[in-house]
Every structure is written in C-alpha cells, then in structure tokens.
Image (spheres, rainbow, N blue to C red):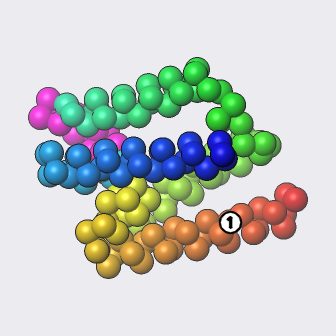
Amino acid sequence: MENFIYPLIGGVLIGLSSSTMLGGIGRITGISGIFSHVLKKPSKEYLWQYFFLLGLLFGGLGLFIYRPSLFDYGIEVNKFQVVLAGLLVGFGTRLGSGCTSGHGVCGLPRLSERSFVATLTFIGFGIITVFIRKMIWG
C-alpha cells in the first residue's frame, strides 16, 4: 500500500496548493517562473515568492529528515549526469516557457492548449530519456 499512498498524498497536496494559489492571489504556481522572477527582480512586492521557495526547500528538507528512505530511488548516477540533467532541464524550461508545475499542474486544468502540448512534450522526452539512458548505461 505504501507504494502508491505517498505519491497520491503528494499529488493531492500539489493540486490543493496550486488551486489555493490561483484562487487566493490569482497566481499560477509555476516554479520556474517564480524562481526566475526572484533571481531577476528582488523586491518586497514579491516577498511571497521567497517564502514559497523557502517552503519548498524546508518542506523537502523536513521530509528528508523525517523519512530519508523516501529519497532512495536505487538509481546510481555520477555528478556529470546530474549536472547535465540539470542543465537540460533548465534549457527545456526556458524553451517551453515554463516547467511541469506551470504547464502540467496549472495549465492543463485551465484547458491551455500550449500547456497541453508542453506537457505531452515533457512526458514524451522523459520516456525517450529513460529509454536512451537504459540503452547506454544499463
């Protein structure tokens, strides 16, 4: 039962938080947009963005301290792969004008055609990446 309950709870919490954000302050919970705005224009007007990002960091850290086993995926990677993956994700986020949270979680419920195409692209390239990785690194 534990194999699906944590992702289910996480999905419900993500849905509730993004709905609360949109309904509460009228903002889309796109992490890449929030992060890039914080880097570009630090200001008190957007203080909520700093707290939002800190909440993500401390929430993840708290869960890691409480249940570190949830972070063990049994996948061994080297630092080069991690850096390369991070750069590719950053490039894809810029190219796609957003990330999976903005397009998949917030755009699809609003019936955004652009988000539908972006989400299909994210999923498709994720599948291709896993396939290539398994072919190359086993």
- The quarter holding residue 96 reads bottom left
Percent coordinates x, y for residue 25 in the rendering: 14, 45
- Residue 76 is left or right of residue 110, and the answer is right
Taking the image as drawn, is residue 134 in sight? yes
The stretch drawn in magenta includes residue 44: yes
Task: Identify the main secondary structure in magenta.
Answer: helix
Q: Is residue 32 visible?
A: no
In the image, is residue 10 above or below residue 95?
above
How many numbered discs?
Answer: 1
Q: Position of residue 125 (x, y in %)?
A: 60, 70
Residue at 26% in and 52% down: 19
Report the side of 128 relative to 124 (left or right).
right
Give the magenta part as a residue range: 33-46
Task: Classify residue 46 by image quadrant.
Answer: top left
Q: Amino acid under label 1?
A: Thr
| Residue 133 horizontal side relative to residue 60, left or right | right
Query: Relative to 37, does residue 136 appear above or below in the rendering?
Result: below
The residue that mark 1 highlights is 129
Please identify the quarter of the rendering in which residue 102 is found.
bottom left
Q: Position of residue 85 (x, y in %)?
A: 62, 52
Query: Looking at this view, is 65 or 35 the one in front?
Result: 65
Picture residue at 56% right of the left edge, 52% below the top: 87
The local secondary structure at tag 1 comes to helix
Query: Residue reaching furthest front?
Result: 1
Q: Residues within 10 Å of mark 1 (few under 14, many from 20)?
A: few
Residue at 32% over, 47% down: 16
